[in-house]
Amino acid sequence: MYRIPLRPACHSGTIQNMHASARLSVIRRPELVAAAGDWPGLRSAVQAGADAVYFGCTDLNMRYEAANFDLLEIKKAVAFLHQHDKKAYLTVNTIVYDREALKLKRLLRQARASGVDAVIAWDIAVIEAARALGIPVHLSTQASVANASAVIFFAGLGVRRVVLARECSLTDIAGIIRQLKRRRVHCEVETFIHGAMCMSISGRCFLSHALSGRSANRGRCLHPCRRRYLIKDTEEGKEMILGRDYILSAQDLCAVDFLDRLIVAGIDAFKIEGRMRSPDYIATVTAVYRCAIDAFFAGTLSAELKAALKARLGEVFNRGFSSGFYFGPPRAGGSPGGGAAAEKVFLGEVVNFYDRIQVAEILVRNQRVKKNDTILFYGKTTPASWAQAQELQIDHRPVRAAGKGSSVGIKIPFLVRPRDKVFLWKKKRSADTR
């Protein structure tokens, strides 16, 4: 029921006139680009149907707090992606200081030797160094490109794809694409379709640095904008706690409601934010947008399917959903709400897997597992996968439940491995409002 990815069944439905089958044949299928902060996330993105995955090394990327990949792991990660016919994009998207020149050179040389398909960057030093090594460059959204002239300028520097500023509207994006075609500039356009939105322009924020000395522009943001604050009246000494509305924190972007309009606009690639997210988040979000894109080109992306997919997105972590800047600046009052409709609770770990009978032996370290519970598995070499506990056994005898400290066998339809983590996956009684 919950196994991801399962290319969710795309319901039949009548597509809008602008999506008539005669036009579908001339609309380019966008590349779906997913994020990965570690091996479980990388494998989950691939299994869920991403066309490409972007990831960072241990330094010089905008998600320093993610697990990231060691310099020597880049080659292995790229090889894994290429084996599955996926593209590999390495993020080198922070500002770079002169003292880091040798570190940058070493990283880019490893990237070239590993066969990465592109590096994502915005510092001119990184762009220049990558070009000198013959590595394709995708311009990061940190460059704040919001007009055709800027795209053309960077294309002249050899940039092959520009990730536009998140502040661009759909009208802006369509206009940029038309100008590039008219002027015959061969540079692809990529935009974000899902994930966290920063309150600062293109993520250029100094709040974290001012409060903690950890710069967002170096990938070390502590997200102080998403905390509760005590406000004190300096005249009368009255105090208020701000937190329920989180006035500095934006809702998450969710484009599934209007994904068809983005496809028709001619955007070359759709990006999912999420290198700090869990494997189950990456698997769910990637699978949903894979389904939506495939349904559009099959002529079945109905309003009913969009609603079902959006509900699926609501199961994993979110701060409430908005359309971002696609239809103009977000309105006041769009503060976070909602929260994940489902939660995962640590259960234990896999001790063994008996392939012939498709049974996982699980050591229950926490909680209690019951028959028909939904269970989530993932590990370093196991992508996020869900199964329903339809059969439980202890010492080869069927049981209806297994408590803490027990070793229980659960029949599942996919391969897991010793030391994989196991979680209960259940609906929340009430959504977390944070």
Image (cartoon, helix red, strand yellow):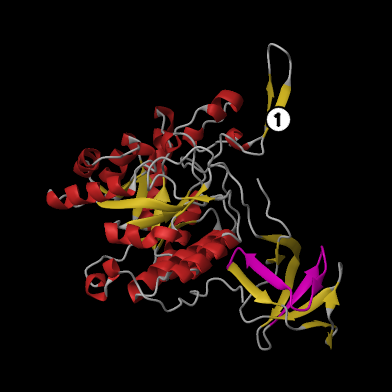
Could you say which is closer to the camera, residue 192 or residue 357? 192
Residue 365, image x and y in percent? 82, 64
Residue 35, image x and y in percent? 48, 55
Name the residue at 71% across, 26% down. Answer: 240
| Amino acid type, residue under disc 1 in the picture | Ile
Residue 349, image x and y in percent? 74, 67
Magenta span: chief secondary structure: strand
When the figure is inspected, residue 315 is found, relative to residue 357, above or below; the finding is above
When the figure is inspected, residue 182 is found, relative to residue 128, above or below; the finding is below
Could you say which is closer to the camera, residue 384 or residue 99? 384
Could you say which is closer to the camera, residue 161 or residue 2? 2
Instruction: State left or right for residue 391 relative to residue 204.
Output: right
Q: Residues within 10 Å of mark 1 (few under 14, many from 20)?
A: few
Where is the C terminus found, in terms of image quarters? top right
Residue 147, by quadrant, is: top left
When the figure is inspected, residue 412 is found, relative to residue 90, above or below; the finding is below
- Magenta stretch bounds: 359-382
Q: Mark 1 = which residue?
A: 241
Name the residue at 27% across, 72% down. Answer: 20
Name the residue at 48% across, 70% down. Answer: 304
